[in-house]
Amino acid sequence: MKKKIDIEMWERKEIYRFFKDYDEPYYGITVELECTAAYDFAKSNKISFFLYYLYLVLKAVNQTEAFKYRIEGDELYLYDVINGSATIDRDNGTFGFSYIPYFEELGLFLERATEEMIDVRMSDQLIRQEIGENIIHFSSLPWIQFTHVSHPRHYKRRDSIPKVTVGKYYMNGKKRIIPVSVHVHHAVADGLHVGEYFKTLQHLFMNP
């Protein structure tokens, strides 16, 4: 479900119009978050840490209103639920784009996500199905302890989908620290909103 936004009545209308048609309206911020409790929870419950932090990333997205707006043509919509399109690795060194629906109930999310990962790895297609706009683009780089990420862009395709990338965690004393990069369209999300997102995600990492 999605709700059409009346731009004329929206408090962000001037910011929206200013950034909407930029050649490059996206900006990115990378932070390091502590993931010790989330990692320990996943391991003690024999859950894939990748799937667990994807669940928490999506949970934080769905608790951050600014990350749920989408520009579609000349209209702006607010979606009820945002799902995930994560890159899934294959044994031959390639990957495919998945469609992983978000469920608040962790067990159901893990079940559906695991099924989708198996399907993607059995396929040789990059994109197996039409996904829609109510997603985030998600990537995991467990080999790289990065401090910055950029993304390839097809400028003829105008989209406003947030892009979240998680990197390799490292130990800082007894704490596990993980880099998280977020790229958002400035017409719908400012630094304030990205800050709110990171605050929410850090809380979820600390309180699994």
Image: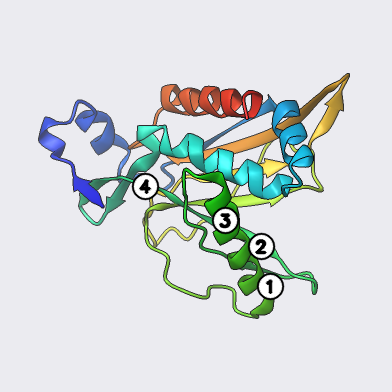
Residue named by callout 1:
121
Q: Secondary structure at mark 1?
A: helix
Residue neighbourhood size for the residue with mark 4, other residues' Cα within 10 Å, grouped as few (<14), some (14–19), many (≥20) = some
N-terminal of the two: label 2 or label 4?
4
Q: Secondary structure at mark 3?
A: loop
In this picture, residue 14 sits left or right of residue 139: left
Q: Nearer the viewer, residue 177 or 108?
A: 108
Amino acid on which disc 2 is placed: Ile
Residue named by callout 2:
88
Percent position (x, y) of residue 208?
63, 30
Q: Are marks 3 and 2 in contact (CB under 8 Å)?
A: no
Percent position (x, y) of residue 30?
62, 32
In this picture, residue 165 sits left or right of residue 168: left
- Compared to residue 133, the image places residue 80 above or below, namely above
Residue named by callout 4:
81
Q: Are marks 4 and 1 in contact (CB under 8 Å)?
A: no
Amino acid on which disc 4 is placed: Val
State how far apart marks 3 and 2 are (Cα): 18 Å
N-terminal of the two: label 3 or label 1?
1
